[in-house]
Image (cartoon, helix red, strand yellow):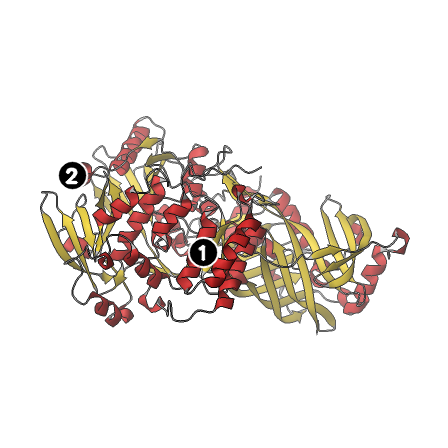
Amino acid sequence: MYEVRKTGGSWAALRRVARGLVPAALGLAAAPAAAQSQAQASHDPALSLATFDSAWTAIHRTHFDTAFNGVDWDALRAELRPRAAAAGTPDELRAVVQEMLGRLEQSHFYLIPSDVRSTLTAEAEALPGSEAEGEAEGDVPPAAEEVVEDDAEAGPGDAGMQVRRVDGRFVVTRVTPGGAAEAAGIRTGWIVEAVDGRVAEEVLSALRSLEGSADPRALEAVGVGVFTSALGGPAGSTARVRLVGGDGRPVTLDLVRAVSTATRTKFGNLPEMPVTLERERVKLPDGTTVGVIRFDVWMPAISRAFDQAVDELRDADGIVLDLRGNPGGVGAMAMGISGHFIDEALSLGTMSTRGDVLRFVVNPRRVDTRGRLVKPYAGPVAILTDALSASTSEVFAGGMQGLGRARVFGETTAGQALPAYMSRLPNGDVLVHAFASFTGPRGEPMEGKGVVPDEAAPPTRAELLAGRDPALEAAKRWISQQKRSGAAARRTGPDHLTRSEG
Amino acid sequence: MNRSFVFPRALRVAAAAVTLLAAHAPLLTAQAAPPADALPEAQQLFDRYAEAIGGRDRIMAVSSLHSTAEFEMPAAGIKGAMEIFAGKPNKSFVRMEFPGMGSTTTGFDGTVGWTIDPIQGPALAEGGPLEYMRETADFLETLGNIPDPARYTSMETVGRVEMGGRPCWKVKLVSRTGRESSNCYDTETGLLVGMERTQESQMGKIATTILLSDYRDFGGIRMPTKSVASMMGQQMMVATRTVELDTVQPSRFELPAEIRLLADARQP
């Protein structure tokens, strides 16, 4: 009954490398140091069994596929339960649970450890390329750990740069204006060789060893998660980064993490996480005005800011929604956000649980933030995606694309679009487990496949070094063409807050 | 108190969000059915229930209700406060506070059904969801869960079952709009211990089982102060803290400004 595509790879194998790093991909890497806990301090065998049983039972009762994607769920319990009982530490228990989840070979089955940060640290250190492997001499700032401890009260910090895998290397793809990376002279396109002891070549080597057995998009997420995690840390602490600049010369820099400007938010069992929304209005050389809205996670805390951004950009010739790196979040938000651009109660897609079929219905937004009647934005909408755009980002992008309301630019998304619950287990960990399949507006499954862009525009290092953003530029060109073709006969908006290009 | 109209908003958020749990014992267990002629008439069960909670006269004398409660989706870690206002003949206003999200409100003024939440904005209910709101906003059912025969084409006792660990008589109800539901009345106390509903929202229909317990007296009417709704493998618990009768001002049910705008704009 359910069409759930396997990713064609081994989620279990991937998890052996990625254990604990999924939260990093979720944007949780900057969880406050205060969240650290006594990771391995105490261990209760009875608690282990209760935790294992709870996880097994939750999936047994809610998995949308009563055949469990071909896994004999009862037999799996019999196989793994003794190992759970014998687990000597919390992390050993987690490994058993992760193995159980991995057998399903589906997205949205993983653990968020009760102590995200300490686990991230532990797992990252266990990865090839970490300081613990003895490969990173000189890559760790002096007394870095002491800095973390000392500045634990300083709140989360931000090194001011984003890293992605481009042309087979980890490369700086975004430098935050005014941030530590920019102040240090770092530019997009620079190659990242190491961050605080995480050595890129070693991580790449580990990922390469899994090529063919795991989805490359998931591998990218894991690899990026290593460096996202490493770049995060308390404000005032130092990240030592080793890079190769545009001129090919290596450089090592100590970046003092600035106080993060992100809003800290928490919803349900999700750990506290930083969220940011940026918007700008850009005027192209031909006079086309483009609004760009970028946000990093689908959390309720950005809803109001998004509404205000749309209000401000209503008169633009087109709007670009940048979902690159956005791992998803609260699925219901897709219905409200899409309503800013669609004036009918259309369906972005359908989720099917064991007993119910529910549609993600657009709620047309006909009242603005000032309480005035408006029409949803009717101009061209471009959506930017990459391999890290997942879950709600895919529901939204795939839905908007399928309804013909948006054109997607960039790279194919993660293919991880299963609605999931987040259940707290007896040991305090959170079990993320899918309870529904999801298909887009044309009935197409997104799990495994992802949203394929209408116009592929992957970044290259050369373009990044030239200060170019292929996906964004392609979207702008399209909006400009739409304007010229008359598809978007719209007023030219006010020039305040407008940045001119060219 | 009939809370069935309360759940769709929470569900809409929770189901489509990343949330909620699973795991609970089977809620409804069929027992050996007695001969059909041994089943009590549905109307008998309603009458007995009305007496058990305070009597029809007391219930009919109430014109409005205001209750405060706490709701919780335990495994999702969502817990918040809620307020319910209801008035004759079929007006309702419900506010739920979701930590990390904000305030979600739902209302029905007898004609217009609406919702406002921070992530989806204001919306008017239309079609099936509006009809569902109209049906579930009936004040007497909200207050006392006593079905009004005029609203149903069929009310039939279908068996003796067990809900939430209590033996009860299950009454199947079919509304004039064809909507099926069931109530289950404790065989010993006569109290309503469970309900089965198919809730309807813009997203679709969701089968829901609601267990009611911990009855307490509020102004001469006994009401359940604990309800547990199970839907799509998750649970939502509501614990009533306070109940006031006949204190709600009619203005409470007036449409919020943004909803009024939408409703006026929709007028032909």
Q: Name the residue beneath numbered marker 2.
A: A466
Which is nearer the N-term, disc 2 or disc 1? 1
**Subunit ID for the residue under disc 1:** A
Q: At numbered mark 2, what does the secondary structure look like: helix, strand or loop?
A: loop
**Residue nearest the viewer, comparing A303 with A330:** A330
Residue designated by label 1 = A96
Query: Viewed as shown, does residue A137 lie left or right of A429?
Result: left
| Image spot of residue B24 (x, y percent) | 62, 59
Residue A419, x across and y down, in percent = 49, 47
Task: Identify which amino acid the numbered label 1 is placed on.
Answer: Val
Point out the residue furthest to the right here. Answer: B37
Q: Using the rendered image, report if marks 2 and 1 lie on a common chain.
A: yes
Asked whether residue B6 appears in the rendered view, the answer is yes
Of residue A405 and residue B255, the one placed in the foreground of this image is A405
Instruction: Say which element carries label 1.
Output: helix
Q: Quadrant of residue A29?
A: bottom left
* Distance Cα–Cα, label 2 vs label 1: 47 Å
Whether pointer 2 and pointer 1 mark residues with C-beta atoms closer than 8 Å, the reply is: no
Q: Is residue B104 visible?
A: no
Q: Is residue B153 above or below residue A20?
A: above
Residue A387: give x, y in percent of width and height: 34, 41
- Under mark 2, the amino acid is Ala
Give me the disc on residue A405. Answer: none
- Towards the viewer: A94 or A178: A94
